[in-house]
């Protein structure tokens, strides 16, 4: 997604402008991790979504949502995913 930093999609007939920005990923465990910040703009309103992915062996965890909530719950989600895999 970050290979094309701006693009447009149509949802229910409404054009939505999307920008993506790759962010540095602090090491939270796992073999690889990456973070992107997506901004969706439609009809003059914007929404920001943070998407964080962590690969740990054959486990891939992707957490998306409000940037603050993703940051708050990432470690707990990774621990839970590791416990169930």
Image (cartoon, rainbow, N blue to C red):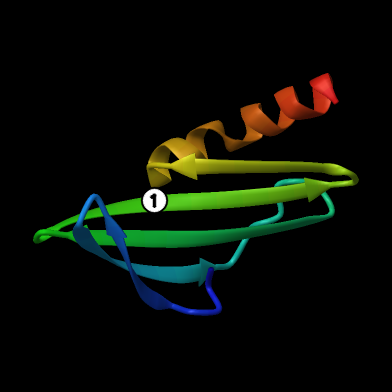
Q: Quadrant of residue 8?
A: bottom left
Q: Residue furthest front?
A: 13
Q: Residue furthest left?
A: 44
What is the number of callouts on the image? 1
Residue 77's place in the image compared with 44, above or below, is above
Residue matched to label 1: 49
**Residue 38 location, x and y as percent?**
40, 60
Q: Secondary structure at mark 1?
A: strand
Residue at 88% across / 44% down in the picture? Answer: 58
**Residue 22 location, x and y as percent?**
52, 70
Query: In this view of the protein, which residue sits in the foreground, 24 or 7?
Result: 7
Query: In this view of the protein, which residue sits in the foreground, 80 or 26?
Result: 80
Query: Is 44 on the left-hand or right-hand side of 19?
Result: left
**Residue 20 location, x and y as percent?**
43, 69
Q: Quadrant of residue 27?
A: bottom right
Query: Is 5 on the left-hand or right-hand side of 8?
Result: right
**Residue 31 location, x and y as percent?**
84, 54
Query: In this view of the protein, which residue sits in the foreground, 46 or 34?
Result: 46
Query: Is 73 on the left-hand or right-hand side of 49?
Result: right
Residue at 52% across / 51% down in the picture? Answer: 51
């Amino acid at each position: 997604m970050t290979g094309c930093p701006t693009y447009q999609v149509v949802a229910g007939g409404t054009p939505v402008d999307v920008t993506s920005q790759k962010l540095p990923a602090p090491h939270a465990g796992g073999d690889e991790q990456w973070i992107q910040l997506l901004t969706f703009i439609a009809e003059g309103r914007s929404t920001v979504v943070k998407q964080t992915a962590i690969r740990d062996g054959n486990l891939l965890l992707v957490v998306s949502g409000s940037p603050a909530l993703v940051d708050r719950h990432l470690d707990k989600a990774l621990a839970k995913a590791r416990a169930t895999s």
